[in-house]
Image (cartoon, rainbow, N blue to C red):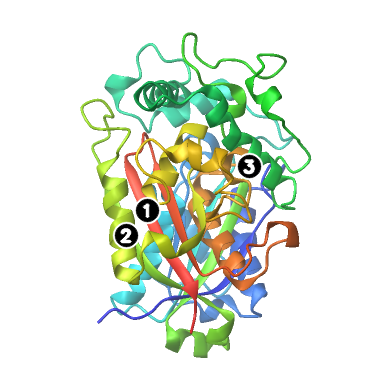
Amino acid sequence: MRKPVYIAAYHQSKFGKLMAMTVPEIITSAVTGVCNEIKADPSVIESGSIGATCNFALNEQGLLAGLMASVPGMAGKPIEAVENACASGGQAILSTIWKMQSGLGDTGIAVGYEKMRDAEGKMDGKLIGKVLGYFSHPEERPGKVFVFPHIFAEIMAAYMKAHGVGEAELGQIAVAEYRNGNQNPYAQMQKVQVSLDQVLRIEGINRYVVDGLPLKTYDCSQITDGYAAVILATGEGLSKLGVRKSDCVEIAGYAQATDPLKSSGRDILHPAGAYRAMNEAYKMAGVSAAEVNVAEIHDCFTVMGALGTEVIGKAANGKGAHYWVDGKANVDGECAINTSGGLIAKGHPVGATGVAMVGWCAWQLLGKVPAALQVPNPRVAATFNIGGPVCSSVCTVLRRAG
């Protein structure tokens, strides 16, 4: 029988630049930071999982599980590293849940991180573009300097053509997210304000990323350092941790599905795996999309903000961008989406992203986000985390613990 699983604690760094922090220091800070949130010793944690994406290519580091086990109190436990492209963080959470469901203890920790900049906070854009390109199908890379922006520029063009959507409608997503990010102290772009005119005007840093395609700089998420961690527990685990259930959020539904890596040959505007995972998560939670009024979705590019709105069931096919234009995704809207600022303004530390989505939704349900971003009467939250060209999808449904 499936045991209810609760979020006992959440902790994250500010997203942006971790400067000279080493990978061991990042992992240690994530583990001890989340444990300190509930004054728990790491020795109480019975299993763990860690998600990262670029650790080999950018940081020359493998066996991240061993680094987690190096944190005092974590040695000798079932821990593994997971990689599922940009869904690695979400996968780490599911991996931790599955271990507890299989009987490997009643407490677990899921960590996600990415270190994409150097010790001075600088980035090598071409190297990062090449490394991220490894998470696409080899046959879809030729002719693309920056593989993923190019792939999603094609998806953006297809979405606009199929649904009669313009650059301005998709640009509204970026404007709304920067507005939210301005109020989030953890957001990378907290101090950057953007108007729709700026998003649409080709000037300064804002340019078309690929000639002949509509994707612009402001349509893109950020290159980001950051880490995030959650402590998960069953009811018995909460007792071990000394945490009251009433102070927790339940991960009431969760699912993962993977489509073929090659995006051509499948309906990229209606990703089957994404819909399946989201619907399975809703089914497990026993709720409908109509009950959700908080969500964090994977807006690596503005077109995914539109598609993600459709996947979580808040807009019909092709109407995702209009949901934002109509104000329904605002903090006080029908369903507040990406109040954190999303990947576009909060930042996208690839391996941490899925963990941060779940953590922010938990904070929303517990009334812990800044007042300007707090959703009135939050009821049910949904998250949608993707990896690759909408290939891997990790979805969760959260609610206050009864």
Q: Is residue 80 left or right of residue 349?
A: left
Q: Which amino acid does the dot numbered 1 rest on?
A: Val
- The residue nearer to you, when weighing 353 against 326, is 326
Q: Is residue 222 left or right of residue 143?
A: right
Q: Which of marks 1 and 3 is in front?
A: 3
Q: Which amino acid does the dot numbered 3 rest on?
A: Glu
* Label 1 secondary element: strand
- Choose top left, top right, bottom left or bottom right for residue 388: top left
Percent across and percent down for residue 5 are 41, 76
Q: What residue lies at 60% left-to-right and 53% top-to-bottom?
A: 227
Q: Which amino acid does the dot numbered 2 rest on?
A: Ala
Are discs 2 and 3 less than 8 Å apart at CB?
A: no
Percent across and percent down for residue 20 are 72, 43
Give the answer, above or below, for where 243 lies relative to 10. below
* Label 2 secondary element: strand
Question: Residue tagged by mark 3?
Answer: 177
Return the disc, 2 or 1, that comes first in the chain's sequence.
2
Numbered badge on residue 78: none
| Gap in angstroms between the C-alphas marked 1 and 3 | 22 Å
Q: Nearer the viewer, mark 2 or mark 3?
A: 3
Give the answer, above or below, for where 74 lies relative to 170. below
Question: Residue tagged by mark 1?
Answer: 394
Are discs 2 and 1 less than 8 Å apart at CB?
A: yes
Question: Residue tagged by mark 2?
Answer: 255
- The residue nearer to you, when weighing 86 against 130, is 86
Q: What residue lies at 53% left-to-right and 28% top-to-bottom?
A: 128
- Choose top left, top right, bottom left or bottom right for residue 365: bottom right
